[in-house]
Amino acid sequence: MRMLRNTITHILNGLAGISFLVMVILTCWQVFTRYILQDPSTWSEELVGYLFAWASLLGASIVTSERGHMNIPIIVEKFGASGQRLLNCLGEVIAFLFSATILVFGGIQITTLAMGQMTSSLGVPIGVFYIILPLCGVLNMFYTILNIADILKGQTSEKEAA
């Protein structure tokens, strides 16, 4: 399972990096077309917005894989080892429920709904860009299950689990 986790995380890092690189290139293209050619590129501006959302959601999945999501360690550290394990598992369960409800269920709903709407400049169904919501939701759920297993084995961080 560790190898699968590392492979998926490696792919996510690559996709997020490529997304960021494409955003930089497209933003430079926007500046060039607007100020040098005096003919702004509308499609690139729209695509940068969608790529930003993709990079953010992919980054959130990477953070989930590393158990780096928000927590309040000052409270957790006041408990003993079993209390810390319980609170860490509770945090993962909350992340799992959020991912299942908002990202997967809500993401499928909005993606399906948006398939009938076209983007203004690209002419692509908006749902194509929203598909990242349920995809990252499933990835987050996968990671939270692995995180809970690691916590129950007594591993306190992702680096320790590797």
Image (cartoon, grey):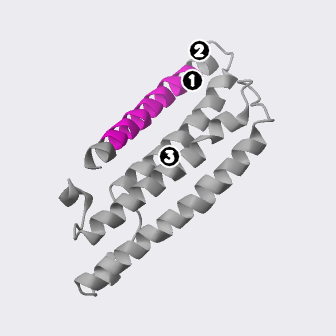
In the image, residue 90 above or below residue 52: below
Which residue position is annotated with label 3? 56
In the image, residue 11 above or below residue 39: below
Quote the CA–CA distance across marks 3 and 1. 23 Å
**40 sits to left or right of 85:** right
**106 sits to left or right of 100:** right
Q: Identify the residue shown where x is 62% and y is 40%.
A: 131
Residues at circles 2 and 1 in contact by the CB criterion of under 8 Å = yes
Which residue position is annotated with label 1? 31
Identity of the amino acid at label 3?
Ser
Q: Identify the residue shown where x is 67% and y is 48%.
A: 108
Q: Which of marks 3 and 1 is nearer the N terminus?
A: 1
* Bounds of the magenta segment: 7-30
Check if residue 26 falls in the magenta segment.
yes
Circle 3 — which element? helix
Residue 76 in view: yes
Q: Nearer the viewer, residue 138 or 50?
A: 138
- Label 2: how many residues lie within 10 Å, few (<14), some (14-19) or many (20+)? few
**At which x and y percent is residue 36?**
59, 14
**Residue 54, quarter of the rendered image:** top right
Identity of the amino acid at label 2?
Ile
Check if residue 80 falls in the magenta segment.
no
Q: Earlier in the sequence, mark 2 or mark 1?
A: 1
Residues at circles 3 and 2 in contact by the CB criterion of under 8 Å = no
Circle 1 — which element? helix
